[in-house]
Amino acid sequence: LNARLVVLFGDNSVVTRAGGDNAGYYYVKAKEKGAKFISVDPILTDTALVTEAEWIPVNPGTDVALMAALAYVMIEDDLYDMQFMATHTVGFDEDTLPEGASPDSSWMAYLMGRADGVKKSPRWAAPITGIPASRIVQLARQMAAIKPCAMFQGWGWQRRAYGEQAVRALPILAAMTGN
């Protein structure tokens, strides 16, 4: 309810949330209080329409590529909470890897291409996700700068091969941005 920015990743809570959690109701209330909504989803959903969200269509199953590029921008532009990531996470960068972990096995090493030679930049992600690189940069900057920013995921992500990776990547963005 107090978010200034709400980013929905494949989340159509107005229609699909079961169990009486009333997420759609609270989205509408947040919108009434002035929150801006962005819906990252292959489908223009009822939730996006009700909240008057900016719709960013993404190719199905490419959310992790998008989140990697968002994190890349936040790191390159020094838009993330370095202190929090250094003191409250494990494996974000080489300094926080657990003892015995392989060198260059951190999230940062993956993003910067040290693990595989491929930087996970917006230019890299654009043809994968179908989202222009300039919009990926803009979204990363919005998510890092507008506080508080709430990030929600729908249930469809984990219903496919490697779906757990998106579920793991979104909380990293929340931690990086202090949300």
Image (tube, grey):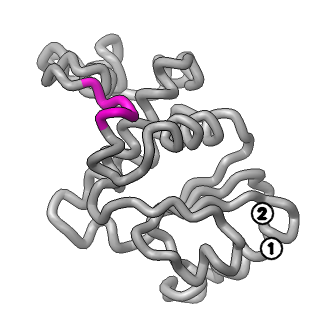
Q: Amino acid at mark 1?
A: Lys
Q: Nearer the viewer, residue 117 or 89?
A: 117
Image coords of residue 2 (percent x, y): 80, 56
- The quadrant of the picture occupied by the C terminus is top right
Image coords of residue 9 (percent x, y): 47, 61
Q: How many numbered marks have been drawn onto this rendered protein structure? A: 2
At x 51% / y 27%, what residue is drawn?
Answer: 74
State the extent of the magenta-drawn residues as a range.
119-124
Measure how far apart labels 1 and 2 are at the Cα level: 7 Å
Mark 1 element type: helix
Q: Label 1, on which residue?
A: 29
At x 69% / y 80%, what residue is drawn?
Answer: 50
Q: Amino acid at mark 2?
A: Leu
Tell me if residue 34 comes above or below residue 156 in the rendering: above
Mark 2 element type: loop
Image coords of residue 116 (percent x, y): 13, 24
Q: Quadrant of residue 27?
A: bottom right
Left-right relation of 154 to 174 = left
Marks 1 and 2 in Cβ contact (< 8 Å)? yes
Q: Label 2, on which residue?
A: 1
Tell me if residue 166 comes above or below residue 136 in the rendering: below
N-terminal-most mark, 1 or 2: 2
Instruction: Give the class, few, some or many, for how many residues have Cα within 10 Å of label 2's Cα (few <14, many ≥20).
Output: some
Tell me if residue 35 comes above or below residue 92 in the rendering: below
- The quadrant of the picture occupied by the N terminus is bottom right
- Report whether residue 91 is seen: no
Left-right relation of 126 to 144 = left
Tell me if residue 70 comes above or below residue 45 in the rendering: above
At x 54% / y 88%, what residue is drawn?
Answer: 15
- Assess whether residue 5 is covered by the magenta stretch: no
